[in-house]
């Protein structure tokens, strides 16, 4: 399976470099020497020549692109890489649609997505029309079973229950 790693923006300079918006959390997938697949009609693959920071942005160069005109033609092109198969790592599209259940198997809702967070990602659960954000940490989400279509959540009091009183009354 191919996943989008970056999107090409505007050309920079005269030697074929372009600004890119990186959309992967694996920047090593765009390391120099790596071949990426593209959404471009003329260039189905490109070989990364360089990837560097420039004024709070990211610049990329490709072996096949050497002029500004070629670089300008790439604008909007998606750079695709192969998905990794890792233990205890999931892509958002794999989680969307999973049934959220308690440790006892009780239905909590349906996972509708994932939101990047400052400390950890947040799982978005539709709990009977109410959006609940669950920190994606093992203490609260001890099991994800994509094959069975479930995500087990061990919610802290008040996360799914609006009637929970913080004072314990």
Image (cartoon, rainbow, N blue to C red):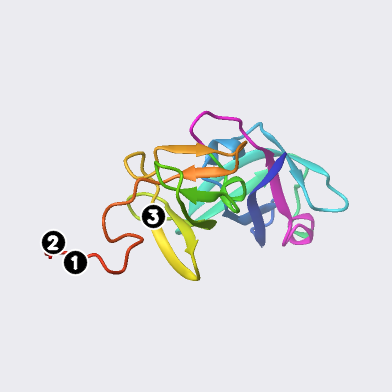
Is 134 one of the magenta-colored residues?
A: no
Q: In what element is the residue under mark 1?
A: loop
The circle drawn on residue 134 is 3
Q: Which residue is mark 2?
A: 168
Residue for point 39% across, 38% down: 142
**What is the C-alpha distance between the residues marked 1 and 3?**
19 Å
Disc 3 crowd rating (10 Å Cα; few below 14, some 14-19, many 20+) is: many
Is 79 one of the magenta-colored residues?
A: yes
Relative horizontal placement of residue 129, taking residue 160 as reference (left or right): right
| Of 29 and 70, the residue lying toward us | 29
Closer to us: mark 2 or mark 3? 2
| Of 143 and 78, the residue lying toward us | 143
Disc 2 crowd rating (10 Å Cα; few below 14, some 14-19, many 20+) is: few
Q: In what element is the residue under mark 3?
A: strand
* Image coords of residue 111 (percent x, y): 53, 55
Q: In what element is the residue under mark 2?
A: loop
* Image coords of residue 129 (percent x, y): 50, 71
């Amino acid at each position: 399976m191919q996943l989008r790693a970056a999107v090409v923006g505007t050309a920079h300079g005269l030697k074929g470099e372009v600004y890119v918006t990186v959309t992967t959390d694996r920047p090593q997938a765009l390391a120099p020497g790596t071949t990426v697949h593209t959404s471009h009609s003329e260039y189905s693959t490109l070989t990364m020549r360089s990837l560097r920071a420039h004024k709070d942005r990211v610049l990329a160069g490709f072996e096949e692109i050497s002029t500004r005109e070629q670089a300008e033609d790439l604008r909007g092109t998606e750079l695709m890489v192969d998905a990794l198969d890792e233990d205890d790592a999931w892509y958002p599209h794999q989680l969307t649609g999973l049934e959220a259940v308690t440790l006892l198997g009780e239905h909590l809702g349906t996972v509708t997505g994932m939101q990047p967070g400052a400390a950890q990602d947040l799982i978005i659960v539709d709990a009977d029309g109410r959006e609940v954000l669950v920190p994606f940490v093992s203490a609260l989400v001890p099991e994800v079973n994509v094959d069975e279509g479930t995500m087990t959540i061990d919610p802290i009091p008040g996360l799914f229950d609006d009637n929970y009183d913080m004072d314990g009354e």
